[in-house]
Amino acid sequence: MSNPSILILPGDGIGPEVMDQVTRVIDWFGAKRDLSFDVSTDLVGGAAYDAHGTPLHDDTMAKAQEVDAVLLGAVGGPKYDDLDFSVKPERGLLRLRKEMDLYANLRPAQCFDALADFSSLKKDVVAGLDIMIVRELTSGVYFGEPRGIIEEGNERVGINTQRYTESEIERAARSAFELAMRRNKKVCSMEKANVMESGILWREVVTRVGAEYPEVELSHMYADNGAMQLVRAPKQFDVIVTDNLFGDILSDCAAMLTGSLGMLPSASLGAPMANGRPKAMYEPVHGSAPDIAGQGKANPIACMLSFAMALRYSFDQGDEAARLEGAIEKVLADGARTGDLMGPEGGIPLSTSQMGDAILNALDASR
Ligand code: IPM
Ligand code: MG
């Protein structure tokens, strides 16, 4: 049988340097755990625009459709701020999500014990935190029509449309309930049913799907209250399911509970392919961080944890995923810190590749 295939799209900013460390981890699994992958690499975002005049070449899109999993670094940067909207780096990412139909975006927010002091919240509010946000990723106001900037009278009007079909809500909800069954059996759905019809439908459909999962405790919250509850008492949640835009905002908020955006992975999953694996793309939640790009300061952990999610959700290697997560937890417990994880006491931060060294050593020790 041939090896499973991975397409790596390092992208822009710190994307390439964190991905270099992930490549070392992938190689380690091939050499030491007899778990080899066929890895290919291509361009996305600003890097693709520089080479091809488009943030995602059609050939790259076609490759992404064929592989077992895509691993993406980050896209965007100030260099591309003035580009036409249609060729902005972010459009490459959105096209991948849309054309691969990756409707369920899993964004776990877990607080590692060693980092509980780094959160902007009090330690006892975040210690032991383990929540999962399921963000609908292919619809809603990001994609709804009509959209655009039009002339009306003597001024311009910016238009975007929040639009959700029942089936779009249903499949995102189902992903959330399935996850909850393997976790603590709680789902909280967030929308704005008090002001938006799409929110009313969202609540109705989630409730209907929930009836198929009697073991799961379902609650509903308006998304603004949800944002407040996330910083007030985040441990009340297990799985949160929400739409594309609220999910974008709430997941950044949840990420920061854990101490650093440099720690948070994500998985974007679609329908099963012919081989039974879901269409899948894995990416860190952090962006391209142009301010520190190319300086070897970036934290590679979010990207490595994204690969761990690939091991778990695409390759059915939950034990090996846990091995990698365990290695990361170990180096953090031993005090390994990149710049984003430096406390007020200071110290000399590890470089991106030194953090990679530490994690590879911990992986070696895990065997
Ligand atoms: C995210 C990002 C993206 C989004 C951008 C880069 C298009 O913020 O993945 O959360 O808004 O979805
Ligand atoms: Mg975001």
Image (spheres, rainbow, N blue to C red):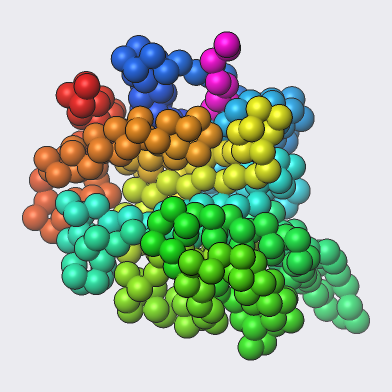
310 vs 341, left or right, is right
Q: Is residue 331 above or below residue 208?
A: above
Q: Quadrant of the C terminus?
A: top left
In the rendered structure, does residue 310 fall within the stretch colored magenta? no
Q: Residue at x 43, y 46 (%)?
A: 265
Q: Residue at x 57, y 46 (%)?
A: 268
Please provide percent x and percent y for residue 259.
Answer: 28, 58
Please provide percent x and percent y for residue 322.
Answer: 32, 37
Relative depth, front residue between 162 and 272: 272
Q: Is residue 236 above or below residue 57?
A: below
Q: Residue at x 52, y 45 (%)?
A: 267
In the rendered structure, does residue 6 fall within the stretch colored magenta? yes
Residue 317 visible in the shown view: yes
Residue 349 visible in the shown view: no
Quadrant housing residue 9? top right
Q: In the image, which residues are magenta? A: 1-11
Q: Quadrant of the N terminus?
A: top right
